[in-house]
Image (cartoon, grey):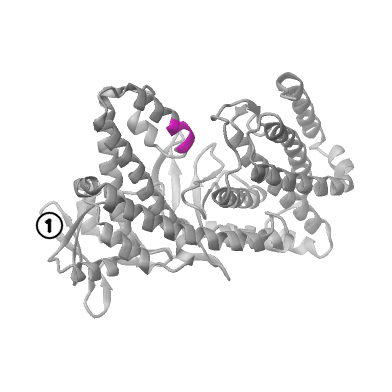
Amino acid sequence: MTVLDARILERLMEEFQQSMRGLLKDVCRDFTRNYADATRTFDLPIGWFLSLGQSFTQAEYSHWKVVGWIESLNDLLYFVDILTQVRQERSRLEIAEQLRAEFREKFYEHGYADEIFPRGKPEPRLLLGRLTALCRRLAREITQESVCLAPRLACAWVAEQRRSAWVVPCDLAANVERVELPWSCAIGTAGLCFEASGAVRTALRRAEGQGEFLITASGIELVIGDRAYPLMDCDRHERWHWRRLEPLPLRKSRYGALILGPTLVYGKEKTPIGVRPTKPEVAMRMRRALSAIAAAWPEGDRLLALLTSRIVPLKAAGVVSFSYRHRPGLSAINCFERDQLDLIDDLIHENSHHHLNLLLRKEVMYQHDHNQEIFYSPWRRTLRPLRGILHATFTFTMGAMLFERLVMWGSGKAGKPGWKKAGLNQRDLARARYRCLEEIESVRYSLKDLEYAGRHLKWLTAGGKELVRHLRDALASLERGKQEYEQQVSQSAFGPTLRRHRTELAQAREQLSLM
């Protein structure tokens, strides 16, 4: 078995779930023992966080919402520690410079750097105030998200604490990271959502989404200004006053349901501008793409079922798809500008990022590279750091495997009816052949750089070198099969493009070679 085998991933997922359970306990213990002042300052209900953690099933500890929440709490602990150091330092220039360097490596997916270093400079005199503001924001968001993960349990916790009420500030504007609709509460981990009534939505718009949850033993109210609106009652039976929006499952498997979320909309500047309900026809396209993957590549479909639990459509010109390391299983997929073959490819591509991120949680695979951008990327045609090359090589190896399986499925007699049913045509079949060969060339190029990074630069650990060996074996298998349709691609409309791609890679190797 290799790291591309679903059985190994299942074991790693169990280990990951146990590690997240342990991380939550450790972070809460650290806050209690070492940062009691910060806990009070930022109003962190550590006892509630521990109670919430005890309510999660093992499977929920790898859910994207729970993982994101725990990791945000862990980030807050890190920043509280930095804040403590900054308060003790008279000269803050050195710590500001160190922190700015760390942000580039540790928090490249977050917007933390924009908050602490908005001008891209250390600015040590402003560091304390900006760190304090960041900690306050994180504390509010973490507490609000914890309540939404288990609102009924929050009421029970208030009763256990013998408190008359617990007030939690909240922001119910659209959340673009979790892709949640405005003026609504996304509850738990199953995709359930409750949408505010017209009067509440009007009040929230006027307040720019700002309000407070007033939590008592008998229920929760939303307070906006000087008016309270009932949200839920939980005496004997849980009863919601807002409109219930059921989750939309694309399919169910032994690993759980794959849920289709709202649509994330980007503006002209390629930044999020809103979250909208997803149209029914998008679900139809997604289901057709999933059925094609299942028919053509059962092993890849199993990995998809294991690692991806939520898909959010992305309406953004020029942006293909993306995912976050700290939200494993959540994939944003552009299905508005992309055709059906692209959609199939993007589903596997983002799932492969989840796949590699799970492996990286188990083992450190690279070190000492200092985020230097010295490796040429055949995909971006720019210089990229080792981390980016490793992710690209892994994900596009999986992409090449997908295209090979699609070609085999579409070329066979049994596959032709299913190919058409999946929304694919003969041009897609020709393009799949080309894409397989294109990715083989690109992966071969980057594998040489990865081997150089491991052998000469010593930037890959033993685990990283092992992963590269697995990818090399996968590439060798793909290259044995490519001869069957090399001539077909060469004589097709895609032949000139493939030859140009090979020429560009040869030129890049000559000009930028590390060998």
Asked whether the viewer can see residue 427, the reply is no
Front residue of this view, candidates 29 and 464 = 29
Considering only vertical position in the picture, is 171 above or below 288? Answer: above
| Residue 320 falls left or right of residue 464 | left
Front residue of this view, candidates 222 and 64 = 64
The residue located at (65%, 46%) in the rendering is: 463
Whole-percent x, y for residue 330 in the image: 50, 53
Whole-percent x, y for residue 92 in the image: 30, 24
Name the secondary structure under disc 1.
strand
**What is the crowding at mark 1: few (fewer than 14 residues within 10 Å), some, or many (at least 20)?**
few
Image quarter (top left, top right, bottom left or bottom right) of the C terminus: top right
Front residue of this view, candidates 242 and 191 = 191
Query: Which of the 4 image quadrants contains residue 143?
Result: bottom left
Asked whether the viewer can see residue 174, the reply is yes
Whole-percent x, y for residue 299 in the image: 70, 61
- Toward the top, the furthest residue is 511
Front residue of this view, candidates 403 and 417 = 403
Magenta residues, dominant SS class: helix
Magenta span includes 510:
no
User: Residue flagged by tag 1: what amino acid is it?
Assistant: Arg
- Toward the left, the furthest residue is 226
The residue located at (28%, 52%) in the rendering is: 33
The residue located at (60%, 63%) in the rendering is: 10
Q: Name the residue under label 1.
A: 227
- Toward the bottom, the furthest residue is 236
Magenta span covers which residues?
102-106
Whole-percent x, y for residue 253 in the image: 58, 69
| Residue 103 falls left or right of residue 464 | left
The residue located at (71%, 33%) in the rendering is: 455
Image quarter (top left, top right, bottom left or bottom right) of the N terminus: bottom right
